[in-house]
Image (tube, rainbow, N blue to C red):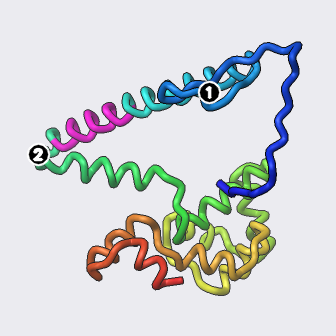
Amino acid sequence: MKQTNQPLHLEFNSDRTYIAIVYEDQEVGFCTPEIAARIVETLNEDEQLHEDNDTLTKALQMACLDLIRRTGGNPARVNKLMERYLENAKRPEHGTRAIAFLLRDRQRELDVSDKEFIFFCNSYRLSPQELRDIYRGKDITDEQIKVIARIVGKSAQELIEIRDGFSNNEMNTLARILGTSTQELTELLK
């Protein structure tokens, strides 16, 4: 939050009703009933999201534990399996999968079928086989990057940074190997 030395301009309308905002038994401000209702609604939504998140986390933990038991694995590794599933469920920021997501986004923007998108990519000189390879996670060459950049409307340099960057999981692993923090490693790689 940026702090300025300029005086605050407060408006007070004596014809309006104001409600005190209290935090830790101290009045910290006033607002209209409409704003108070929105604040309460937002806080309730936030609380519901936390409850839903807890429920989903418990469900994932139960499913992973069930899977481990059925496969004869070690139940103590349930958290590791959960982390792996959560990492795979997130949209990747780097690597071939991240570029595959950009291609899928472009297909949605164009609102075309898979067949039409394959034809579209092929018109830019990205063959159907190359497109399948990207979706399967195979490495992307610099030549393919140039073509994909035109397809998705980004610069080749942006795509190279996405392709060659590290995911959070990879950064954590590398930091552990090097005996440093993830933040220090990130600063070092900039």
**Which circle, 2 or 1, is nearer the viewer?**
1
Query: How far, Cα to Cα, is label 2 from label 1?
Result: 45 Å
What amino acid is found at the position of numbered circle 1 in the picture?
Answer: Thr
Residue 96: image location, x then y, percent: 54, 70
Residue at the disc numbered 2: 72
Residue 172: image location, x then y, percent: 35, 69
Viewer-side residue, 152 vs 52: 52
Residue at 28 percent of width and 36 percent of height: 63
Residue 13: image location, x then y, percent: 87, 21
Q: Quadrant of residue 134?
A: bottom right
Residue at 49 percent of width and 52 percent of height: 90
| 10 Å crowding of disc 2: few (<14), some (14-19), many (20+) | few
What amino acid is found at the position of numbered circle 2 in the picture?
Answer: Gly
- Range drawn in magenta: 56-68
Magenta stretch contains residue 63: yes
Query: Could you tell me which quadrant the C terminus lies in?
Result: bottom right
52 sits left or right of 107 in the view: left
| 10 Å crowding of disc 1: few (<14), some (14-19), many (20+) | few
Magenta-drawn stretch, dominant element (helix, strand or loop):
helix
Helix, strand or loop at label 2? It is loop
10 sits left or right of 167 in the view: right
Residue at the disc numbered 1: 42
Residue at 21 percent of width and 36 percent of height: 66
Residue 111, above or below 42: below
Residue at 47 percent of width and 73 percent of height: 166
Residue 1: image location, x then y, percent: 65, 54
22 sits left or right of 126 in the view: left
Viewer-side residue, 84 vs 136: 84
Total of numbered circles in the picture? 2
Q: Earlier in the sequence, mark 2 or mark 1?
A: 1
Residue 77, above or below 44: below
Residue 14, above or below 150: above
